[in-house]
Amino acid sequence: ILNVEQSPQSLHVQEGDSTNFTCSFPSSNFYALHWYRWETAKSPEALFVMTLNGDEKKKGRISATLNTKEGYSYLYIKGSQPEDSATYLCAFDTGGFKTIFGAGTRLFVKA
Amino acid sequence: SAVISQKPSRDICQRGTSLTIQCQVDSQVTMMFWYRQQPGQSLTLIATANQGSEATYESGFVIDKFPISRPNLTFSTLTVSNMSPEDSSIYLCSVDPIDSGANVLTFGAGSRLTVL
């Protein structure tokens, strides 16, 4: 059984704080690692897809790194804003149209 | 990217009843995916729906409990049958709109079901 673990489960930060979360995944059968952002009552939205060991992706204040050899990815948010409050999901992709999601990290940013 | 309309957005259902969730995509897609997120759990794939063939169910999910229709390339339904409180979840449909092979999914906004 393939397991994807995310930590922490939830996180409360103040506006302006920088923060990061972890996604751990199997180091075998790797095809891609996805990060999604899911705001309450909205659709999950793709942030990054990462395929190569050592990949770093950035979108505004959000960035992510990937280590496929040891099976982890970090998501960083610099200078958190209240609108960053959401659940951040990572998903391990073995190819073949099957994506295995973690339970998510729920971020609360207080103004 | 594709836009997905999913309904209902939420519902409160009685034990033993069934509810059908509809998913409409604004472009033609080969595969549509149905996911469930139970409280505190991961998004879990229920089944993959292809037009013109029976859906492919993941381990732990069966057609009698979660019948799926896929009448054309833009529409699908998932029925949650004979509901129990354990079926209280968020159900999401999703697609890979560009069939890129990169499996970057576009999701509907979800259907939050509460079963009493």
Image: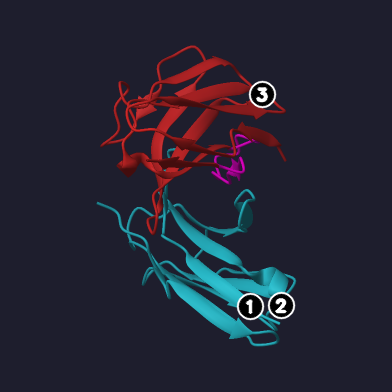
Evaluate whether label 1 is on the same chain as label 2.
yes
Q: Distance between the residues labelled 1 and 2?
A: 6 Å
Q: How far across and down, in percent of the image, does residue B8 sit? A: 58, 33
Query: What's the chain of the residue with tag 3?
Result: B
Q: How far across and down, in percent of the image, does residue B55 sit? A: 41, 22
Q: Which residue is drawn at 41% across and 59% down?
A: A102
Q: How far across and down, in percent of the image, does residue B60 sit? A: 26, 37
Which quadrant does the C terminus of chain B fall into?
top left
Evaluate whether label 1 is on the same chain as label 3.
no
Marks 1,3: beta carbons within 8 A: no
Residue on which the image places disc 2: A81
Instruction: Please state if A97 lies on the left or on the right of A27 as rendered.
Output: right
Q: What residue type is labelled 1?
A: Val
Q: Which amino acid does label 2 sit on?
A: Gln
Evaluate whether label 2 is on the same chain as label 3.
no
* Magenta stretch encompasses residue B98: yes
* Mark 3, other Cα within 10 Å: few <14 / some 14–19 / many ≥20: some
Foreground residue, B101 or A59? A59
Residue on which the image places disc 1: A109
**Image quarter for residue B95?**
top right
* Mark 1, other Cα within 10 Å: few <14 / some 14–19 / many ≥20: some
Residue A35 in view here: yes
Q: How far across and down, in percent of the image, does residue A43 sit? A: 62, 48
* Mark 2, other Cα within 10 Å: few <14 / some 14–19 / many ≥20: some
Q: Colour of chain A?
A: cyan
**Image quarter for residue B103?**
top right
The answer to which of marks 1 and 2 sits earlier in the sequence is 2
Q: How far apart are marks 2 and 3 (CA)?
A: 37 Å
Residue on which the image places disc 3: B28
